[in-house]
Amino acid sequence: MKISQNEFDLFRRLIQEKCGIYLDNSKAYLLENRFARLITETGCKNFGDLYFMIKNTSRSKKLVNKMIEAVTTKETLWFRDQYPYKALVDIIFPNYIKANQISNINIWSAGCSTGQEPYSIAITTHEFCKTMAEGLNFQKRISIIGTDISEGAIEHAQIGEYDDIAIHRGLSTTRLNKYLYKNGKKWQVNDAIKKMIHFEYLNLLELPPRFGPFDIVFIRNVMIYFSDELKRKILKNIASVLNKGGYLFLGTGETVQGYSNQFDYLKHAGGIFFQLK
């Protein structure tokens, strides 16, 4: 079923309003493919009927969630690009130890999809702490939260179960056998790592009151889906919940330049990350 330009424009505005994701005209095929099932499920005849139902019926909230599920990309890897995790081990964690910070170190993985990023952070933390005499005490001070706008992705992350394809995307055999175990045809993250993370639904455009503060924020390969205006808003929101001197990791190729002047640039292991001034 083809979507007309007018129908695409209506959905584009609605999607951006609800979750910030901006779709250019080249993404019309994406809506055609991913909304086909939703049209069938709802008994709608076409895209126009579906739009009307989402906007004007008592089922709107559930349908908005399904719409967001359909357009969000759940492409993710374990230990993506490596350098953020090396920066944690080589620079950030040692800095907190040298500073004798006794409070918790709060880490936020925003747009965490099905959980591979926060689990990678937890595994990195566990490995780092194993090298220290006071490692267990340091690990207890680490608090990790993973959030995403996709309720389905968050449910997947909470379960922590992955198929053979997913576990071979960035996860070494050594780490696989150490931190996951075979559960039928899938691999399950072990309880020691799972209990280090709290997952919850979150819309980046609407941070709840008393959210944070954080010392480290990962929001990688998320900003690319937003307009320039929303990038500025999101970076401002992140700065507001990040402690002074806190660290920010964006995706490779993403930057704060032109969107925020609240961060300094740092380099390590071939990558760039940022520190709140």
Image: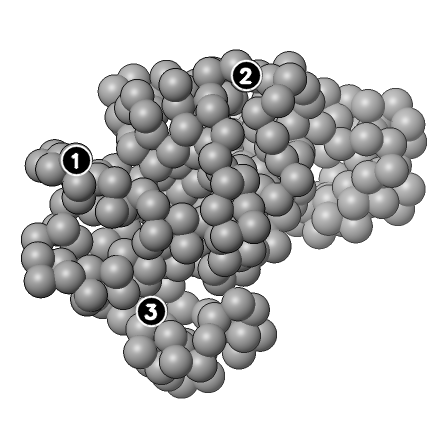
**Residue drawn where x is 27% and y is 51% of the image:** 197
Name above or below for residue 218 compared with residue 81.
Answer: above
Secondary structure type for disc 1: loop
**Residue drawn where x is 91% and y is 31% of the image:** 4
The residue at which mark 2 appears reads as 260
Question: Viewed as shown, does residue 51 lie left or right of 166?
Answer: right
Which quarter of the picture shows residue 242? top left
Real-space CA distance between mark 3 and mark 2, rounded to the nearest whole angstrom: 37 Å
Q: Earlier in the sequence, mark 1 or mark 2?
A: 1
Q: Position of residue 192 (x, y in %)?
A: 20, 65
Name above or below for residue 202 compared with residue 93.
Answer: above
The residue at which mark 1 appears reads as 99
Disc 3, disc 2: CB below 8 Å?
no
The residue at which mark 3 appears reads as 189
Q: Which quadrant does the C terminus fall into?
A: top left
Q: Amino acid at mark 2?
A: Ser
Name above or below for residue 172 compared with residue 144.
Answer: below
Q: Residues within 10 Å of mark 1 (few under 14, many from 20)?
A: few
Q: Position of residue 153 (x, y in %)?
A: 48, 51
Q: Earlier in the sequence, mark 3 or mark 2?
A: 3
Q: Position of residue 94 (x, y in %)?
A: 24, 47
Q: Which one is in front in this view, the residue at disc 1 or the one at disc 3?
A: 1
**Residue drawn where x is 44% and y is 81% of the image:** 173
Q: Earlier in the sequence, mark 1 or mark 3?
A: 1
